[in-house]
Amino acid sequence: MPLLETLEDGFTGALDIGRWPNSYGDPTAVGGRARIPCAVGGFAGLRSATGYTLAGSHFLLRAYPPAANGAVSTAALSLLVLTGTGGTDAGFIIDTAQGAMGLYLREGYADAGAQFPPYDPVAYAWLRLRETGGTLLWEASPDSSNWTVLRSAPAPAWAADTSLSLLLESTRTDGSDNVAEIDNVNLPTSLVLLGAARTASAARPVIGRKTVPLGAASSTSRARPLSAAHVVQLGAARTRARAGTIARLPRPARALTPRTAGPTLTPSTTGPRLAVTSTTGG
């Protein structure tokens, strides 16, 4: 049961029919974008396989709706999650002839709660339909990073179906033929950068790891106790130096001890003279 967000395409080569097996009207991939013909009275579209679920998932993309090219009625790009029941779907329809965007949750092709904000090609460059916690959200972003909720509604039961498909379709009723374009289906440029920045995103964990060595380089604060240890050793060295001096002091004291052997002086009236050697000496 693949999530709808796993359907990814950056259209960097030829159109991948494996991703869009139910397409019609000759869409192509040109210059890194999907190109969908928008001809008067005709329909053309990219349509995925019918094997996805919207529950806990989303689709997002960069939308380039067809220019009005003189149309006063309809020049439209539809971005819809389709069920197996015709007219039961949800998503966006941008009509540049009317300068508006419809936010739809339809049943039988009708939605009494549909909303129609004026279409802003800058603020609504990126569009996302997302289901989370039982709520369906229609969101827009100028950069695929900062999203604004345009509408919310209770998610329909069919959001949990496993047979949903994604349709990207262009049509017009008047004006001159041209094309609509799509890019980066489920590949927001913020993630592509993070995928380049999954070098950059890998860079964030790396930066995080660098703070760990710096905190380990707070083991420079542990180095301070090491210098204190040197002071203790030097203090101990000074103690040993004093101890060496003290150890030599008893030797002169022993040299001053009188010996019984040897000549001694005895008093005399005529002056000092040497006495005989003591019998206790030797």
Image (cartoon, grey):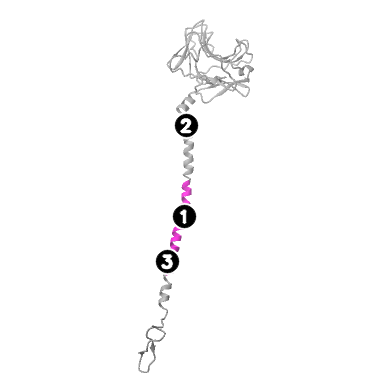
Amino acid residing under circle 3: Gly
Whether tag 1 and tag 3 are in contact, CB under 8 A, the answer is no
Q: Quadrant of residue 94?
A: top right
Mark 2 vs mark 3: which is more N-terminal?
2
| Nearest the eye: 271 or 116 | 271
Magenta segment, which residues? 219-247
Of the pair 49 and 257, the residue shown nearer to us: 257
Residue type pointed to by label 1: Ala
One can see residue 148 in this view: yes
Q: What residue is rendered at 42% in x and 66% in y? A: 244
- Which residue does the image show at 55% across and 19% down from the upper left? 4
**Quarter of the image containing the N terminus?**
top right
Residue with the mark numbered 3: 244
Picture coordinates of residue 112 (x, y %)?
Answer: 64, 13
- Disc 2 marks which amino acid? Ala
Q: Residues within 10 Å of mark 3 (few under 14, many from 20)?
A: few
Q: Residue at horizontal 46%, vertical 32%?
A: 203
Comparing labels 2 and 3, the label whose residue is closer to the camera: 3
Q: The residue tagged with tag 3: helix, strand or loop? A: helix
What is the CA distance from the residue labelled 2 to the residue labelled 3? 62 Å
Tell which circle, 1 or 2, labels the residue nearer the N-terminal end: 2
Image coords of residue 60 (percent x, y): 53, 20
**The residue tagged with tag 2: helix, strand or loop?**
helix
In this orientation, which residue lies closer to the viewer: 277 or 187? 277
- In the rendered image, which residue does mark 2 sit on? 202
Q: Residue at x 42, y 68 (%)?
A: 245
Instruction: Kindly identify which residue carries mark 1.
Output: 229
Say if residue 102 shows up in the picture: no
**Would you say residue 242 sits in the magenta stretch?**
yes
